[in-house]
Image (spheres, rainbow, N blue to C red):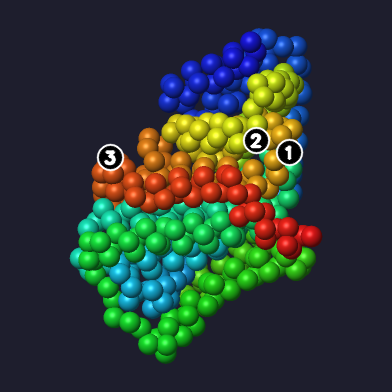
Amino acid sequence: MNALIIFVLLLALMLTGMPISISLGLTVLTFLFTMTEVPIDTVALKLFTGIEKFEIMAIPFFILAGNFLTHGGVARRMINFASSMVGHWHGGLALAGVLACALFAAVSGSSPATVVAIGSIILPAMVRQGYPKSFGAGVITTSGALGILIPPSIVMVMYSVTTNTSVGKLFMAGVVPGIMLAFFLGLTTWWLARKHNYPRMPKASWGERWNTFRKSAWGLLLIVIVMGGIYSGAFTPTEAAAMAAVYAFFIAVFVYKDLKLKQVGKVLLDSAAMSAMLLYIITNAILFSFLMTSENIPQAMAEWITGQGLGVVTFLLVVNILLLLAGNVMEPSSIVLIMAPILFPVAMKLGIDPVHFGILIVVNMEVGMCHPPVGLNLYVASGITKMGITELTVAVWPWLLTMLGFLILVTYIPQISLWLPNLIYS
C-alpha cells in the first residue's frame, strides 16, 4: 500500500510538469512527514551523507573534460581522421560520423555532448555532399548515444554510486558492447547508403590517413590516459576523471589553441551548471532510495517477483520493458537513480551479475535517448538540424530497430559484457 502511495504521488507531481529532481524530493518529504515518524534531522543528514561518495566527484570532472573537448576542436580532427579511414565506402561521410561518435564517446562520457560536437560539424557537410538531412540526423542522433556506453560514462558512474558496483569493472564491461553497437550502427548506415546510392568520398592515401591521425592524436591519447591509468592501477576512475579534465584543458587551450583563455570561464560555468543539475537529481534520488529502503519496498518487490516464479529470462524481459517505458518520460540519470535501487536487489537474488545488469540498464538508456517524447538526443539533434521531433522520430527508426536488436543480444548473452572484465580482473 505504501509503495502505491509513493509511486502515485511521484507520478502526479511529474505530470504537473515539475522537474524530476523536485518531484522526487517533494514525494519523499510529503510521505515522511505525513505517514511516518522519521525526524527531520535524519532527512537533512541523509541529504549530505548521500552524496558523500568519492565516486560522485568523477561526474563534474568528466562533464568539464567533455566541455573542453567540445569547444576545443577535438571533434573536427576526429571527423577528419574517421573520414580518411572509411570515407570511400558507401555513405562514407555518414560512416565517418558513426566512427567519430564512437571515438568522441571514448573521451567525453556524455551522449548529448557527442551529438553536439560531431553533429554540428558533420551534418552541414553531409547536406552539402547531397545526403538527405533526415538520413544524417538519424545517423548522428543514434550514434551519439554511444557516449554513455563506451567508457568513460557518466551514467555508469551513477549506476556504480547507486549499487556499489565497481566503476572500473563497469567501464571495462562497456568496451566490447560499445564497439559492437558502433559496428551494427555502421552496418545499418552502410546498407541504407548502398541501397539509396548515397555519395562516397575519394579514397584517402595512407599518407593522408597518417596526417589526419597525427593531428587527432592528442585527443585520442585521452582514451589511453583514462583507460590505461585506471587499469594499470595508476589512478582510480575519479582521479582519472580529474586527469581527463586537466588534459582536455591543456590540449584545447595550449596544443590545438581552438579555445581562447578568455572562453575558459564560460566553459567552467557551463560545466558547473550541468554538474549542479545532475548532483541535485542524485541528492533527491538518494533520498528517494532511502525512503524505499526504510519502507522495505525493494525487498518486498524482490520477494514478490521471486514468489511469482519469474526466472532470469522473464525478469530481464520485464526489466527491459520497464526501462523502455521509463525512457518515454524520464532522462537517463533519473531512471538509473530511481530504478536501480528497486531492481538491483531482485537481480542479485536471481543470481544476475551486477556488472552485466549495469550494462543492460545503460543500453536501455541509450535507446531511451533516441525516442520521443523526452529522448535527449532527439532534442539536441533537433536544435542542430532545425527539424521537428516527429520528423526526427521517423528519421531514426532504422537505427533504433538496430539498437533494440542489440539490446536483446546484450540482455541474454552476458559474456558480451563480462568477457573483458573477467579477463582483466581474474
Question: Is 311 situated left or right of 321 in this image?
Answer: right
Q: Are marks 1 and 2 in contact (CB under 8 Å)?
A: yes
Distance from the alpha carbon under mark 1 to that under mark 2: 8 Å
Residue annotated with mark 1: 351
Bin the neighbour count of mark 1 within 10 Å (Cα to Cα): few under 14, some 14-19, many 20 and up: few
Distance from the alpha carbon under mark 3 to that under mark 2: 36 Å
Question: Is 316 situated left or right of 240 in this image?
Answer: left
Residue annotated with mark 3: 390
Quarter of the image where one finds residue 93: bottom left
Question: In this rendering, which labeled residue sits more in front, label 1 or label 3?
Answer: 1
Residue at 50% in and 66% down: 103
Secondary structure at badge 2 equals: helix
Q: Does 83 appear above or below 158?
A: below
Q: Which mark is residue 325?
A: none
Tell me where residue 397 appears, x and y as whole percent. Answer: 33, 46
Q: The residue under label 1 is which amino acid type?
A: Gly
Q: The residue under label 2 is which amino acid type?
A: Val
